[in-house]
Image: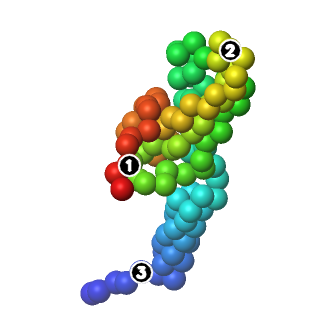
Amino acid sequence: MNRGFTLVELMIIVAVIGILAAGAVFFFMGGIDVNQGHATEMANVWAKEMKIEPIAVKCLSHDTDGDGYVSCSISHKNNAGDIKIIPVECSGVMSWNEGCRTPKAVGY
């Protein structure tokens, strides 16, 4: 005898799939800025390791080119007292990468 799903089982399956899909859309479409917070933290750690006292650290909220790094800018005062901006790329949350690196060269 073939037995199909009961209505309750089917409703539970549909609800679970709906919740997972909604969470994925919210997370991957930038509903929350987890990449920005993680990248900012990584940029601050990088600046400390480079013995730089940042005035401000700004990072994008998402990885624009899919390489696991988020673009950031670290502004600081140099020895002459001038404000300089250092561009870095720092790892996002959904990445195998860790830490920061100098931006890769882009050919035109």
The reply, left or right, for residue 2 in relation to residue 24 is: left
Secondary structure at numbered mark 2: loop
CB under 8 Å between discs 3 and 1: no
Check disc 2: other Cα within 10 Å, few if <14, some if 14-19, many if 20+: few
Check disc 1: other Cα within 10 Å, few if <14, some if 14-19, many if 20+: few
Residue annotated with mark 3 = 5
The reply, left or right, for residue 76 in relation to residue 19 is: right
Task: Pinpoint residue 88: horizontal percent, then vertical percent.
Answer: 51, 35
Secondary structure at numbered mark 3: loop
Q: Is residue 12 visible?
A: no
- Specify the quadrant that holds the N terminus: bottom left
Report, in whole angstroms, how far the alpha carbon at label 2 lies from the one at label 1: 30 Å
Quadrant of the rendered structure where residue 102 is?
A: top left
**Residue at 48% of width from left, 38% of height from top?**
89
Residue annotated with mark 1 = 106
**Residue at 72% of width from left, 17% of height from top?**
81
Residue annotated with mark 2 = 80
